[in-house]
Amino acid sequence: MKVGQLNRRSVLKTLSTSVFFGTATVGRTAARTDTTSPTDLGVLEDSSRADDINANGTIVGRSRKTIDGTSYHRAVRWPDPTSIEDLGTLRDDNAGSSFAHGINNRGTIVGAAQDDA
């Protein structure tokens, strides 16, 4: 996606809230806007991408994190614009990649994660 281009799943007409990509000094970062001014949602370490938002304003997506010298995508949740939570993986050592693709209004998140298999 281009900077400023809206993610088609991220606009909730009932809230008039959009989630889109912006540019940060380090990599790309997800941003949220309720008005005309975007709020940087932050990153785990390098970049972030917002993929969905529910009616409660909770946003899910992914961010990059380095574990043992390897950079991985990690599923993340932004419960509010000031905090980011790493949702982890299904591996015993919690390394590897994970992705959060959607969230419903009850807070159930769908996505994918690496496991030990």
Image (tube, helix red, strand yellow):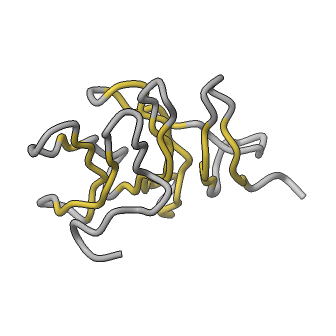
Where does residue 40 sit, x and y in percent of width and height? 20, 44
71 to 34, vertically: above or below: below
* Image coordinates for residue 103, horizontal then vertical, percent: 60, 38
Q: Nearer the viewer, residue 66 or 73?
A: 73
Q: Residue at x 29, y 30 (%)?
A: 81
Which residue corresponds to the image point at 90% horizontal and 58% vertical from the top-left? 117
Q: How many marks?
A: 0
In this rendered view, identify the residue nearer to me: 108 or 117.
108
Q: Residue at x 50, y 42 (%)?
A: 60
Residue that sits furthest to the front in the current view: 14
Query: Residue farthest to the right?
Result: 117
Picture quarter with the N terminus? bottom left
Foreground residue among 54 and 92? 54
In the figure, is residue 63 to the left or right of 28? right
Question: Which residue is depicted at the point 71% across and 42% down?
Answer: 93
In the picture as drawn, the residue positioned furthest to the bottom comes out as 2
User: What is the x, y in percent for residue 112?
Assistant: 72, 54
Can you give x and y, in whole percent of width and height, for residue 28 in the image? 26, 63
